Image (tube, rainbow, N blue to C red):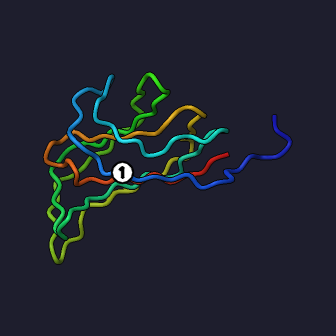
Amino acid sequence: MAAAPAFAATINNGAQLLGNAETNLQVPTTTSTLVTAGASGTKIEEIVLSASATSLVATTVAGLVYIFLYDGSTYHLYDTIVVPANTASASLAPWRYSRAYNTLFIKSGWSLRASQSQASNASIIKAHATGGDY
């Protein structure tokens, strides 16, 4: 056991617009890399998903966002987040969702990746991951 607790020393965050619909959860082909772990590992504190569009009206259809851990050769499905149908307007904000993680640690050589399930949501859902490197 360590004599003193370890704390993240350097911010490690990333954001990507999610692309085409994912059709395979064991060997995905449309993932976007959010964060690559630092040399001594990374702790992810939060993932935020939001609808964004070139116009102010970002419409989502019901679907899913998949969060993967990737070890360099194999994808590991870590979490699945529900995306509701939502039509933004001048009086209704675009969809946004936040999930905090207490124990999402990524070891060196691994990365955090995301994809989504609906063709209609391609290039609309943006995934943000925030954390820190040890």
Where residue 88 appears, x then y in whole percent?
17, 67
Label 1: which residue?
Answer: 16
Where residue 25 appears, x then y in whole percent?
30, 27
In front here: 131 or 4? 131
Q: Residues within 10 Å of mark 1 (few under 14, many from 20)?
A: many
Labels in figure, total:
1
Q: Residue at x 41, y 42 (%)?
A: 33
Q: Residue at x 17, y 59 (%)?
A: 86
In front here: 127 or 64? 127
Vertical position of residue 111 compared to residue 57: above or below: above
From where the camera sits, is residue 69 visible?
Answer: yes
Quadrant including the N terminus: top right
Where residue 29 appears, x then y in whole percent?
29, 30
50 horizontally vs 86: left or right:
right
Disc 1 is placed on an element classified as strand
In front here: 123 or 6? 123
Query: For the residue marked with disc 1, what is the amino acid?
Result: Gln
Q: Residue at x 14, y 63 (%)?
A: 87
Quadrant including the C terminus: top right
Where residue 4 appears, x then y in whole percent?
82, 46
From where the camera sits, is residue 99 visible?
Answer: no
Q: Residue furthest right?
A: 3
- The quadrant in which residue 94 appears is bottom left
Q: Residue furthest bottom?
A: 90
Vertical position of residue 22 compared to residue 42: above or below: above
88 horizontally vs 112: left or right:
left
